[in-house]
Image (cartoon, rainbow, N blue to C red):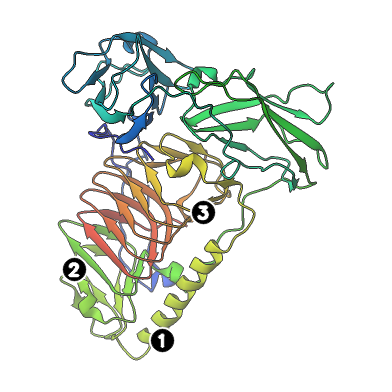
């Protein structure tokens, strides 16, 4: 996925949850409370979510155009030859036509002549680019790529492995969203209702109405406006109007699938068992530096209290828990009182069972969405699966009701870039969002995260990150001056 250098910094307001509750038996009997009167406010900054050619990509055809995808619509007049430039090493700026396509929120730069071969090119978007509210990129977005020896003459094709549903699939959910993946970046202006059409397998049928979302230069999602008919053959047709960035034409491509009788609904929530009594639960340690502020109980097991570092905790006279000025709640470890080790052993077991449950859910609604780059997307409730890591380079919105559930199955790591946020809309609640992550979770400085992390390895929260949910991990949690809030269930 793209690694846009000097990514836009985030203008955000701290996200707090309005909480006025007494911690009771559900959270091991703490009598303290923490309140705030701030309403949740998260402002999505204008940013670039992906580009083509991608940063550091090599072997690019000399006849390629350059595109950048924004996380929201921008003012077309701010995307011009001054704000979007391309320059080869040791050369003057490339002369070309700069344009903006609102339907796909993409800027394009088409050189007037072929680029030089075997040359490093630097693309730049300046802070002159503004969204419709008048907010600009906070700093320049810069990325590089290297051309090959020749022009690109190879036609793009459908990536059959990444596209879902697949050809000849049966029992497809009636509310399916089609995830269309290409073998290379395609020209955003070639993606339209005329170039991508879904119909029943009948030449006389009408095209299914729906919305096309240009996720990144290789991925398009088609969302039908209404559930498809049950037990019906459908055919997706990609026309030869679709081209790659060099203008090579896609051969007309079709795939067919048959719906079943069911439509997906929110998956069942993951049962956390007694692991849900803790805002942070880890097997090898929890550490903090700086002014961390935690609402909820934390625990480590099977390690002892020496694995709780930076809290300057005081053991209670009962010996069953400790307290700290950094925590509105209690600290527990496996060497506290005769009963605590058994309680924590059960909680850790429940945590591991919850991880296995989340990882084992089948029939995902989305597979490999955005090739792991989900920045800028609005995600409906459902089950999402990636065989890679997931990167958030601009704000992601989870839109649903207070009873809707999201489960994210991530085979590698999860990372939020500086200042980026997981935003909840429509009444969605962090306790109904489950992030099952097989490798490290990294929340960069100033990020805001919502949901339950079920982690196989570590969770690292960098300076100023705000965490609303629970981190239940099978190694360690590292904090640096963070606000950590358990869900107000």
Q: Label 2: which residue?
A: 311
The part of the image, by quadrant, that contains residue 297 is bottom left
Compare marks 3 and 1 and give the one earlier in the sequence.
1
The part of the image, by quadrant, that contains residue 280 is bottom left
Report whether residue 315 is seen: no
Q: Label 1: which residue?
A: 342
Report whether residue 47 is seen: yes
Which of these two is toward me, 488 or 92? 92
- From mark 3 to mark 1, how far is it between C-alphas? 27 Å
Which of these two is toward me, 451 or 107? 107
Q: Label 3: which residue?
A: 432
Which of these two is toward me, 58 or 118? 118
The part of the image, by quadrant, that contains residue 116 is top left
Q: Residues within 10 Å of mark 1 (few under 14, many from 20)?
A: some
- Describe the element under mark 2 as helix, strand or loop: loop
Location of the N terminus (image quadrant): top left
Residue located 47% across and 57% down the image:
489
Residue located 38% across and 70% down the image:
474
Give the number of the disc on residue 330. none
Q: Is residue 275 above or below residue 447?
A: below
């Amino acid at each position: 996925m793209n690694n846009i250098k000097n990514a836009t910094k985030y203008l955000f307001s701290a996200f707090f949850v309005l909480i006025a509750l007494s911690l009771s038996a559900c959270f091991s009997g703490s009598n303290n409370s923490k309140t705030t009167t701030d309403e949740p406010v998260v402002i999505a900054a204008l940013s670039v979510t992906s580009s083509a050619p991608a940063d550091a990509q090599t072997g690019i055809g000399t006849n390629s155009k350059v595109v950048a995808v924004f996380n929201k619509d921008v003012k077309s007049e701010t995307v011009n030859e001054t704000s979007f430039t391309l320059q080869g090493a040791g050369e003057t700026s490339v002369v070309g036509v700069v344009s903006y396509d609102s339907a796909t929120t993409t800027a394009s730069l088409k050189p007037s002549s072929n680029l030089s071969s075997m040359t490093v090119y630097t693309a730049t978007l300046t802070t002159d680019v503004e969204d419709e509210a008048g907010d600009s990129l906070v700093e320049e977005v810069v990325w590089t790529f290297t051309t090959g020896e020749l022009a690109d003459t190879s036609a793009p094709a459908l990536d059959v492995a990444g596209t879902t549903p697949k050809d000849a699939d049966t029992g497809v959910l009636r509310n399916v969203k089609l995830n269309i993946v290409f073998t290379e970046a395609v020209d955003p202006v070639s993606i339209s209702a005329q170039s991508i059409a879904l119909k029943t397998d009948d030449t006389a049928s009408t095209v299914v109405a729906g919305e096309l979302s240009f996720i990144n230069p290789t991925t398009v999602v088609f969302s039908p406006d209404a559930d498809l008919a049950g037990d019906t053959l459908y055919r997706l047709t990609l026309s030869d109007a679709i081209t790659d960035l060099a203008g090579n034409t896609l051969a007309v491509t079709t795939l067919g699938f048959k719906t079943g009788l069911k439509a997906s609904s929110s998956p069942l929530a993951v049962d956390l068992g007694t692991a849900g009594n803790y805002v942070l639960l880890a097997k090898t340690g929890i550490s903090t530096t700086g002014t961390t502020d935690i609402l909820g109980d934390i625990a480590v097991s099977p390690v002892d209290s020496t694995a709780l570092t930076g809290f300057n905790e005081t053991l209670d006279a009962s010996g069953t828990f400790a307290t700290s000025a950094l925590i509105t709640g209690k600290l527990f470890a496996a060497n506290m009182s005769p009963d605590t080790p058994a309680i924590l052993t059960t909680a850790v077991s429940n945590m591991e069972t919850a991880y296995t449950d989340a990882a084992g859910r089948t029939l995902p609604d989305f597979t490999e969405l955005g090739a792991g780059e989900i920045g800028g997307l609005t995600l409906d409730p459902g089950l999402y699966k990636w065989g890679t890591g997931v990167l958030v380079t601009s704000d992601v919105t989870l839109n649903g009701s207070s009873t809707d559930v999201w489960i994210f199955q991530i085979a590698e790591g999860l990372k939020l870039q500086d200042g980026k946020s997981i935003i909840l809309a429509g009444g969605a609640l962090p306790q109904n969002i489950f992030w099952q992550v097989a490798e490290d979770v990294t929340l960069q400085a100033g990020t805001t995260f919502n949901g339950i992390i079920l982690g196989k390895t570590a969770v690292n929260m960098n300076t100023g990150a705000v965490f609303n949910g629970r981190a239940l991990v099978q190694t360690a949690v590292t904090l640096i001056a963070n606000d950590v809030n358990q869900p107000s269930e």
